[in-house]
Amino acid sequence: QVQLVESGGGVVLPGRSLGLSCGTSGFIFSDYAIHWVRQAPGKGLEWVAFISYDGSNEYYADSVRGRFTVSRDNSKNTVYLQMISLRAEDTAVYYCARDYGGDSGRFDSWGQGALVTVSS
Amino acid sequence: SYVLTQAPSVSVAPGQTARITCGGYNIRTKSVHWYQQKPGQAPVLVVYDDSDRPSGIPERFSGSNSGNTATLTISRVGAGDEADYYCQVWDTISNHVIFGGGTKLTVL
């Protein structure tokens, strides 16, 4: 079945960098766009970034543009989120989610999430 | 940028019908999706494209979209439906995904 598994979370000092990975299985990875969505403790869902099926298009939330970079390796069925200049407000559970496709932008499968804590 | 507005909480007695709304300017022109999130778990898609249900989602979950309001309706509510519910759209102008603030459904 469709699976997405995030890894790479942890505790990081403000201003430092961290990378997340989203490994996938159970579907033809190169056919699907992938999103990153985060959720701060006790807060709602916040969309972070999008990468198209072939990596040719990337979109970012205003809150992370210029600091976060999304990429993918279709030979490894994996999406990455590189985060630099991290701030306390970036503390959240980060989910990767599969975009079903077409124009509606719905997320039909999600990973279990990876916790990123930015703290001194 | 486009904004989706949800009430923070909704309460309903067991067996009754819960209606969770999502307000947005001319939202009827967009495809609205709804997610259920239980504590400690990832969100789950329960309604997509305003009113369609993914396989495995009970018929008790339904959706509608008109004017400036989209609505998720859950009939015959049970304790297992207690969760946070989020509406979501894709804003094609900004190429951003927008989530509503979420509504906590409490079953009394």
Image (cartoon, grey):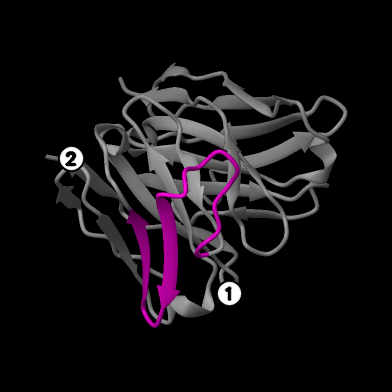
Residue at (60%, 71%) from the top-left corner? B92
Residue at (55%, 58%) from the top-left corner? B52
Element assignment for label 1: loop
Direction from residue A59 to residue A48 in the image, left or right: left
Residue at (15%, 48%) from the top-left corner? B11
Q: Nearer the viewer, residue B60 or B99?
A: B60
Residue closest to the far left: B108
Is A23 placed above or below B83 here? above
Marks 1 & 2 on one chain: yes
Image quadrant in which you'd find residue A75: top right
Which mark, residue B71?
none
Crowding at dot 1, Cα within 10 Å, few <14 / some 14-19 / many 20+, comes out as few
Image quadrant in which you'd find residue A29: top right
Place of residue A53 in the rendered image (x, y in percent of width and height, measured from the top left):
79, 47
Direction from residue A7 to residue A25 in the image, left or right: right
For the image shown, how many numbered marks are present on the structure? Answer: 2
Place of residue A85 in the rendered image (x, y in percent of width and height, measured from the top left):
47, 36
Which mark, residue B93?
1
Asked if the stretch drawn in magenta spans residue A79, the answer is no
Name the quadrant of the C terminus of chain B: top left
Place of residue B99 in the rendered image (x, y in percent of width and height, measured from the top left):
42, 56
| Amino acid on which the number 2 mark rests in the picture | Val
